Image: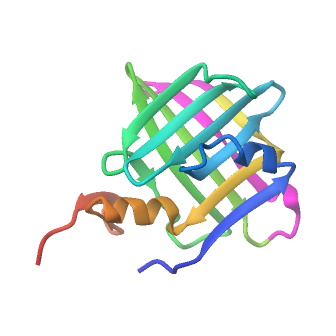
Amino acid sequence: MRSALVLSVLIGGAASARAACMPEEQTFMACHIEGSGKSLRVCFDDDTVQYRFGPLGQSPELALSSSVAKVDYTPWPGIGRAIWENVRFTNAGYIYEVYAGFDRMSEDASAGFGGVRISFGEKDVAVLTCATDALDFTWGEGLFAAKEAAGMMFDHEARTWVAQQDE
């Protein structure tokens, strides 16, 4: 069972990245892409997980969505130096794997990391990295609890989500 802790890691000027989600949504991860004027954000509510990528302060160039029950989400396994999670979206054969985390042993604010790995088949097409001074990563009960509320249960041995069985 996961603890009730929800931790939002705000690194540097991430408050502006946080504002990228709609008021009724929770942030999984939001950031500014290193060396560009683009932002990446994954937001969710009780029903839907949204991927949005595009210029800061403008409509997204790419918006993808998945139901909470069906989104491919990997929660932190509870071991290791880094706390990390990822969410995957598919679109026309492309996989957008959004990842975020932080080094839990470091007091350095730059210990946070995130980005998106875009692949087609087995080949990486692009890897976009978040600027560490503009990263908002919320981990804990948020998306995990939303998936459970949608009737899913995480099988830690198989490392996958399965439908909860009625008892």
In screen coordinates, is 25 left or right of 112?
A: left
Question: Which residue is pictured at 64% across the width and 51% down the height?
Answer: 100
| Coloration of the structure image | rainbow
User: In which quadrant of the rendered image does the N terminus lie?
Assistant: bottom left
Question: Which residue is pictured at 55% across the width and 56% down the height?
Answer: 85
Read off the magenta span. Answer: 106-126
Q: Is residue 11 above or below residue 70?
A: below
In screen coordinates, is 33 left or right of 68?
A: right
Q: Position of residue 16 (x, y in %)?
A: 79, 44
Inspect this view and state whether residue 4 appears. Answer: yes
Name, please, the residue furthest toward the left: 167
Q: Is residue 126 above or below residue 20?
A: above
Does the magenta segment cover residue 120?
Answer: yes
Residue 131, located in which quarter of the rendered image?
top right
In screen coordinates, is 53 left or right of 49?
A: right
Residue 163, located in which quarter of the rendered image?
bottom left
Q: Position of residue 24 (x, y in %)?
A: 54, 50
Q: Is residue 100 above or below residue 7?
A: above
Q: Position of residue 22 (x, y in %)?
A: 59, 43
User: In which quadrant of the rendered image does the C terminus lie?
Assistant: bottom left
Inspect this view and state whether residue 124 appears. Answer: no
Q: Position of residue 95 (x, y in %)?
A: 45, 30
Question: Which residue is pictured at 62% across the width and 28% down the height?
Answer: 53
**Nearest the eye: 64 or 131:** 64
